[in-house]
Amino acid sequence: MVSVLRKQCDTRSEIANECLIPWYVIGVIAIICAATLVLIAFLGPIGQEIIQYRTSQSGVWQIAGQDLTNLLLIAPILLIGGILCLARRAGSKSLLILTPITLMYTGLSMGIGQEWSNSAYNGNIEDYWWLFGILIVGGLILLLGSLSMFTEADAPDFKLRGLRIYVGFMTVFFLLFAVMWISQIQQVTNTGDLPDGSYKAAPTAFWTIRYLDLGISIPLGFLALFLMLSKPKKAYSILLLFFGFFITIGTSVDMMAVVQVLNGDMEAAKEGLFIFPVLTFLSYGGLFYLVKDKLLQGVFKSSEIQLKDQITGKDYSRKKK
């Protein structure tokens, strides 16, 4: 039992030795990325509207939904994870591992996906390129740093029966996701536009998102499902990385759809209003499956300490420290 706990990086010295990147660098970068997301939201469409994006009105509403998710979900994860990392707490890695791919995806999609060649869209996002650059570089540093914090000892034991059922459901919805995007690409190649006219309004954004999703998001999804069945313990940290991406980007897409619907945006994909919430729900379920044993261990350990305090009449947790 003692050897297992040592492998789990429970002590400060072990955290420092295991990380490829110094723990204090990881902690500071996480906090900087959190502050950057908050600043982008403050300067964007839900804040002061200082950043003017070169995209359609529908695209601006989608960015507003993403900024809301950044404020309510991703920035808090980074801030708490960064503070815990600077305090050299082992639990920081379980938070920080959830964010790197989403940070890089956000930075790339915001930079590449603007309608740069369309003079009808005026904007000044190029003046704030460095904010999105921070997300890309910060995501890369957090990717390398958080992955190096994990060992096989961190992975719980998995029961394959329930895992196979879950993987089956996820596979179906990932296929539906892929088919939805491919069908839209087919429509564009055949007719030159989508029925709602959204392609002609923002073609660069269209191709950026389709390339990123069909080239990164969906392949990562299938790879994660394969690893869940084949090597869940060896690939545990990678699974957390992938499912962290799925829940954060999935929540962003759902929030985008909410903002679009509230504003009467006809460009909101009707198929996506069903597929994306289900994928997000299943992704949260998958992440919970990966961490439920650790959550139960934490609850059990806390109850054990409280019980000892009651029996001995002393503050056992302080004594233990």
Image (cartoon, rainbow, N blue to C red):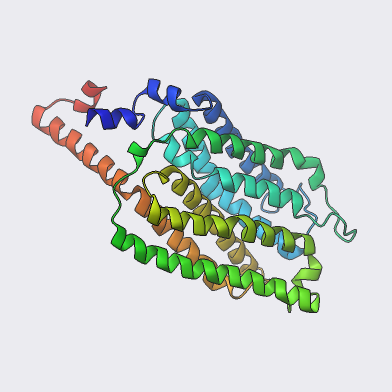
Q: Position of residue 304 (x, y in %)?
A: 17, 37
The residue shown at (42%, 26%) is 15
- Of 76 and 232, the residue lying toward us: 232
Front residue (pair 127, 177): 177
Judge from the rendering whether residue 126 lies leftward or rightward of residue 311; answer left or right.
right
Q: Residue at x 20, y 40 (%)?
A: 303
Q: Is residue 218 above or below residue 112?
A: below
- Residue 242 x/y as whole percent: 50, 50
Q: x, y percentage for residue 64? A: 66, 56
Residue in the picture at 81% in, 44% down: 126
Q: Is residue 175 above or below residue 69?
A: below
Visible in this render: residue 5? yes
Image quarter (top left, top right, bottom left or bottom right) of the N terminus? top left
Most extreme residue toward the left is 311
Q: Is residue 266 visible?
A: no
41 or 86: nearer the eye?
86
Q: Determine which quarter of the picture holds residue 206.
A: bottom right
Residue 271 position, x and y percent, is: 58, 75
- In the drawing, does residue 303 fall left or right of residue 206? left
Image quadrant holding the C terminus, namely top left
User: Residue sitting at 47 percent across and 52 percent down?
Assistant: 243
In the rendered structure, the answer to whether residue 207 lies left or right of residue 296 reads right
